Each structure stands twice: as structure tokens, then as C-alpha cells.
Image: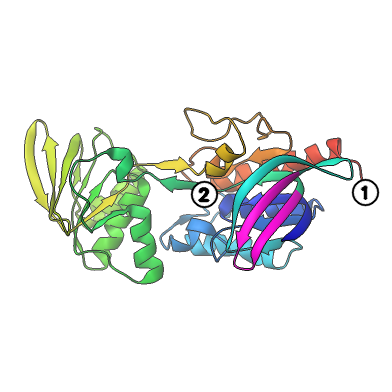
Amino acid sequence: MKSLYYDAVVIGAGAAGMAAALELDKGGLNTALIDREDHLGGILMQCIHTGFGITAFNEELTGPEYAERFIDRILTSNIDVYLNTTIRSFKPEQQNNAEPLKELTGISDKGLIRFYAKLIILAMGCRERNRGNLRIPGSRPAGVYTAGLAQRLVNIEGYIPGKEIVIIGSGDIGLIMARRMSWVGCKVHAVVEIRDTPSGLTRNVVQCLNDNNIPLLLSTQVTKILGNDRVEGVEIIHLGIKSVIKCDTVLLSVGLIPENELSREAGLQLNNTTGGPIVDEQFMTAMDGVFACGNVLHVHDLVDAVTKEAEEAAHFALSYLQKNWQKE
């Protein structure tokens, strides 16, 4: 097992992780940036639609274009990047030369790596709620995807998951995928929302649904997914009236959850409202020297806000290190 020592380790190389790592590097810290995927940029790399960078760069960029602004800087920085590396354990304090270091154990394609660091920034992002969270009755037929997974299949893998689509939930990813599936030749029968107002941004309702003549059914509940081997339709109730929409594919866009399995494993207390770690005004968790920012802390509407928050968290982390560690 290889043991590596850093001033700071950032977990997650999406928008938050890249921004935080760059600020730490700018502050002179020996920094490692770790991600389980095989690329930098996180979810941004599959978001080929525009709408990113409006406040951060005063431009309207696609997700990959926005990520590229940070990736280029990382590749020319002193940051050590570890891709295809999953952190599996997190020990808050290990003694090394009488100085308490955090210990992380990662599994990579090159074997086990043990990272020791003076401070940690958690930037693991968020994940989608799935059918298990909704408890929609029915069997388990093929053709049920989260909207984000469908986005990856279409935009990165080049695979169209179905032809006749119903989207459950009006979150932004679902609205964007309604347009995307329509553009690749699929029939999007409806976006079904249980609430009486859309969950996503108004601009996405207009640009993705209205401009493409895709129905938005508000105050409508999906009560059953039909089909055994493959999805055959969904049963819905609207204003007490039950009906069936025939389809072969269901995409779920029912919200995001901060990705905090590692936080739980480390014993961090989570906020019941946001789902992220409880932090102080400087983004530090109850564990000394462990910070959190971006969607792992609370789900943001805009990636520009994620970047800004991550940079602020990194500045507080730098101040923490200057106050609590002796200069070497």
C-alpha cells in the first residue's frame, strides 16, 4: 500500500472540487484532488446544453466548456490528480510526528493508496433520487432510468434508451432531457409533476417544454408503472381521474440528494433539511479541519454558485491551516 502526504486533500473533481483545489494550490498548499470517475469535471461533462457560466464568466457556456476553464488550469498547476480512485474509509485523526493528520484510504486501478492530510475538503456532489425513493407500484421492467443516467447514455455513450418517453418530476435535469429526447427523435408524451408548480427553473420550462410542445401535467400523480419485461405505460391520476399514458421508457427527475455516504462513514452529523453535513459559517464541519462545499453540502440551482462557494470554503481552509499548523 502506497502512503502519500499532503497539506490538503479535496474529494470530488466536479465544479466544487476543482474550484477549491485551485484556490488551495494558489495559496501554496501541496494539494491532492481525488475522483472516482476517469475524468475531471464531474457531471458537467455530460451537460452539453448551455446555461453555465453566466455569473462566473459573464458568458453562456455548455457544461464541458465551463469545466474546461478549470481543467486547463488544474493540468498546469501543482495539484496532484488521482482519477479512478474511490475513497472507502476516512479516519479523522492519525498521529504522524506528533501532528494529527486525517487518514483516507482509496481504491484505485493501481491498488490501495493511503492519503494523509492536514485538512480535507468534501466536494462529492449529489446524486439523483431513484424509483426506490418514490415507491411507485409495479414490477421492475426495463426502461426505467433516472434523468441523469439517460443524459449520460445519450450525450456520452451515444445510446438512446427508448422511443416513447414519460418523465416523472419536473426537476431541471428532467426538463432538459425532455428537450434532448425530443431532439434525438423520441416522442416525449408528458412531464408529470405531482405538485401544482414546476420544480425546475422557469427558463427551462419555457425553453425545454413550451418551445418543443411537450405537455407539463401539474397536480398529477403516477400511481403505477405498467409492464413486466419492458415498460408499457404509466397509470396517472389527475383531479381524481385515472388514465394511462402508453410509453416504453420512464425517466425520473424527482430531486437530488447530497452524496454523503463517506461523510456518514466518518461520523459527521448531517442536516436533516439539506441532507449535507452541518457546517459553521466558515464551511467547517464538526470535525476539525474537515470542510464541505458545493452540492455535497446542499443542492444548488446554478453551478456558478457552486464554484463561488467552493472558493470561499478554500479560503477559510487556508486560514485554518495558517492558524493551527506550524510552518515547516
Q: Residue at x 19, y 37 (%)?
A: 221
Farthest-out residue, right: 328
What main secondary structure does the magenta stretch of the protein show?
Answer: strand
- Residue 177 point in image, percent of width and height: 31, 56
Q: Amino acid at mark 1?
A: Glu
Residue 34 is drawn in which quadrant? bottom right
The one of 140 and 121 positioned closer to us in this rendering: 140
Q: From the viewer's perspective, is residue 96 above or below residue 181? A: above
Measure the alpha-carbon separation of dots 2 and 1: 36 Å
Q: What residue is shown at x 77% (from left), y 58% (from top)?
A: 4
**Residue 107 colored in magenta in the image:** yes
**Label 1: element kind:** loop
- Image disc number at residue 113: none
Question: Within 10 angstroms of label 2, few (less than 14), some, or many (20 or more) residues?
Answer: many
- In the image, residue 49 sits, relative to residue 282, either above or below, namely below
Residue 198 shows in the view: no
Of the numbered discs in the image, which one, if any, rests on residue 328? 1
Q: Residue 289 at x, y = what percent?
A: 73, 38
For the N terminus, the image quarter is bottom right
Mark 2 or 1: the one toward you: 1
- Closest to the observer, 306 or 275: 275
Magenta segment boundaries in residue numbering: 102-116
Horizontal side of 252 relative to 105 (left or right) equals left
Q: Which mark is residue 303?
A: 2
Question: In the rendered image, which quarter is residue 217 located in?
Answer: top left
Residue 205: % across, % down: 30, 47
